[in-house]
Image (cartoon, grey):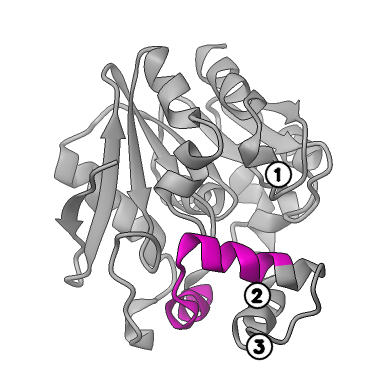
Amino acid sequence: MTPQFYTAADGTRLAYYEVGSGRPLLLIHGYISDAHTNWMKFVPTAQVIADAGYRVIMPDLRAHGASDKPHDPAAYPKDILADDQFALIAHLGLTDLDAAGYSLGARTLARMMARGFRPGRAILSGMGLEGLTEADRRAGYFRQVLTNLGSHAKGSPEWFVEAFLKTSGGDPIALNLLIDSFASTEAATLASWDFPVGIVCGTEDQDNGRAEALAELLPQGHYLPIPGNHMSAVTKPELAQAMLAALQS
């Protein structure tokens, strides 16, 4: 995919990609990943959704992919990823769209909605209740991985995260700084969302808490289980099918 670029409010240059035409869908990738890795590399999730009649817009989050990866801590204030997505929506002139995210992408979308963003339909994937209400619950784990590269036991969870970092070409310094920007969303705020939200999550995925509990809390939440754990679910064709089911229900 060929990136296009826009500039965030603080001057950071950010990349995004588009495929398809039709109703806009903002599709946000997860932590240490990027648009291509999350949505096209293993299975063509974005293309499947585009073929169903959507204009799929995929940002590379700040500190990821083809976007800038600042090493200045000042570039990572709370909620900066939500701010960046608001800037992208404004850059594209969008006023009516759907939105979806995986893992950190889901948390970013949740922060946007907590601040008033109302997509027609929303999808939080690879995400559970605690991953939104306790945004820093895994911060220490990722800091330990990123600051001790090369020392993790082969086959350990940390080793697999490091291997994924190498695959995606991630910048450990920028990714470590980005953790400071993560913000939690109160359960009462989640319970106030009166619009459809699909919760798509692997049946073996507990990394971000309980997906079923999140769906139960949301007034129009709908749980759509797919095979896999947090790392493997994005490699399954069922991810695209579940997302389409949530968008079209």
Please tell me whether the stretch drawn in magenta is mainly helix, strand or loop.
helix
Residue shown at 49%/41% (left/top)?
A: 41
Label 2 close to label 3 by CB (< 8 Å): no
Please rate how many residues cluster around mark 3, counting C-alpha atoms within 10 Å: few if below 14, some from 14 to 19, many from 20.
few
Residue linked to disc 2: 142
Q: Of callouts 2 and 3, which one flags the residue occurring earlier in the amino acid sequence?
A: 2
> Residue 57: which numbered mark, if any?
none
Q: Is residue 99 left or right of residue 1?
A: right
Classify the position of the C terminus by image quarter.
Answer: top right
Distance between mark 2 and mark 3 Cα atoms: 10 Å
Residue shown at 33%/87% (left/top)?
A: 72
Q: Residue 94 in the image: state x and y as whole percent.
A: 22, 33
Q: Of callouts 3 and 1, which one flags the residue occurring earlier in the amino acid sequence?
A: 3
Residue range (magenta): 160-180
Magenta-drawn stretch contains 183: no
Q: Amino acid at mark 3?
A: Asn
Q: Is residue 32 left or right of residue 20?
A: right
Q: Is residue 237 left or right of residue 113?
A: right
Instruction: Between residue 154 and residue 81, name the one nearer to us.
Output: 154
The answer to whether residue 173 is seen in the rendering is yes
Q: Quadrant of residue 153?
A: bottom right
Q: Amino acid at mark 1?
A: Ser
Residue linked to disc 3: 148
Describe the element under mark 2 as helix, strand or loop.
helix
Q: Amino acid at mark 2?
A: Phe
Residue linked to disc 1: 232
Task: From this view, report whether residue 59 is shown above or below residue 39.
Answer: below
Task: From this view, report whether residue 135 is shown above or below residue 51.
Answer: below
Number of numbered markers: 3
The answer to whether residue 192 is seen in the rendering is no
Q: Of callouts 2 and 1, which one flags the residue occurring earlier in the amino acid sequence?
A: 2
Residue shown at 50%/79% (left/top)?
A: 172
